[in-house]
Image (cartoon, rainbow, N blue to C red):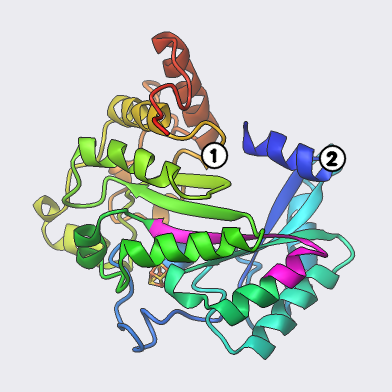
Amino acid sequence: MRYVDYCLEQFGHRMQKLTLNTGMGCPNRDGTLGTQGCTFCNNDAFVPAYCQPSLSITQQIDEGIRFHSNRHRQPVGYLAYLQAYSNTYAPLPRLRQCYEEALAHPQVEGLIIATRPDCVNDHLLDYLASLAKRHYLMLEYGIESCYDRTLQSIQRHHDYACTVSAIRATAERGIPCGGHLILGLPGESREEIVAEASLLSHLPLTTLKLHQLQLLRGSKLGADFLDNPASVPPPFTLGEYISLVCDFLEHLRPDIIVERYAAAVPPSHLADPSRSWHHPDGRPVKSSDLARLVTTELNRRNTYQGIRYIR
Ligand code: SF4
């Protein structure tokens, strides 16, 4: 199922996510676990200009609705999306205030909370489960990799067992879970990346976002690349990436909704924009193009998501 159809099923109409910035920070940046952050991370690359933590959640929602309202002809509903940093990383009273302010907005129909798997606990999940009885709620976990050696090399400061346990504990409470996985992290072979599809299929995930590795300015990997381009793996060509995604999908449980196949940030945030994909006529490849290319390749193979999935 496509994410747009999942939203139609859940809400009866198209949904627009409103990215909000709670300014909650991250234990991998404030010194609790580390100060440099994950090696691929620079949150500034994907936070829209209207998301200023100096504005209240309500003000950010209003700004976001204004920002998006010119872009949609059909009526849409809105999901508050706490995307940047770790949005369960604060004392419970502050979390409650933030989540409940977002859900109290008359045009917001649900809440998506992005966080690290090590930033949830039973107490918080019990509270979220009670909130999920009254509102649509999803927790979106940064998985990034299923391999401990990769998680260590990208400075995540948690292991895959922590991811498994957070996702299970969340889903057991009836809260839908999303995941975010990066394809092409240093040290991972193509076979290992495809094998992650099987590993993730055993988790109670509702949605999954796939992202290619992007070298962002302001991230450690971006700096390493600028220092020595040979120190980071070469990017996948567009054809290689489409083929990889299709192999991955073939092994993925068929009911997991793949929300996106790749990330897109403005070229000014990239350490080397020439690593981005372009059509033969020079146009940049957009997310919608990629989705179409993936579908075309699956059709060419006469396969589909889950054809190689083993229970
Ligand atoms: S990716 Fe998430 S956990 Fe890692 S440094 Fe960035 S905000 Fe923190």
Label 2 neighbourhood size at 10 Å, few (<14), some (14-19), many (20+)? few
Residue found at x 52% / y 41%: 260
Label 1 neighbourhood size at 10 Å, few (<14), some (14-19), many (20+)? many
Up/down of 17 relative to 193, above or below: below
Of 274 and 60, which appears nearest the observer?
A: 60
Q: Does the magenta stretch include residue 130?
A: yes
Figure quadrant of the C terminus: top left
Number of the label disc, if any, that sits on residue 256: 1
Disc 2 residue type (three-letter)? Gly
Locate residue 180 relative to residue 19 in the image: left or right.
Answer: left
Residue found at x 80% / y 62%: 135
Is residue 55 visible to us here?
A: no
Up/down of 75 relative to 158, above or below: above
Residue found at x 42% / y 30%: 249
Q: Which of marks 1 and 2 is in front?
A: 1
Figure quadrant of the N terminus: top right
Judged from the image, the secondary structure of the residue bearing numbered disc 2 is loop
Q: Distance between the residues labelled 1 and 2?
A: 20 Å
Tell me which segment is drawn in magenta. 129-143
Number of the label disc, if any, that sits on residue 139: none
Disc 1 residue type (three-letter)? Ile
Q: Name the residue under label 2.
A: 12
Is residue 100 visible to us here?
A: yes
Task: List x then y, in percent, for residue 280.
Answer: 36, 21
Task: List x then y, in percent, for residue 93.
Answer: 68, 90
The image quarter in which residue 21 lies? bottom right
Task: List x then y, in percent, for residue 23.
Answer: 56, 80
Of 243 and 175, which appears nearest the observer?
A: 175
Residue found at x 84% / y 40%: 12
Q: Considering only order in the chain, which callout, 2 or 1, is on the residue closer to the N terminus?
A: 2
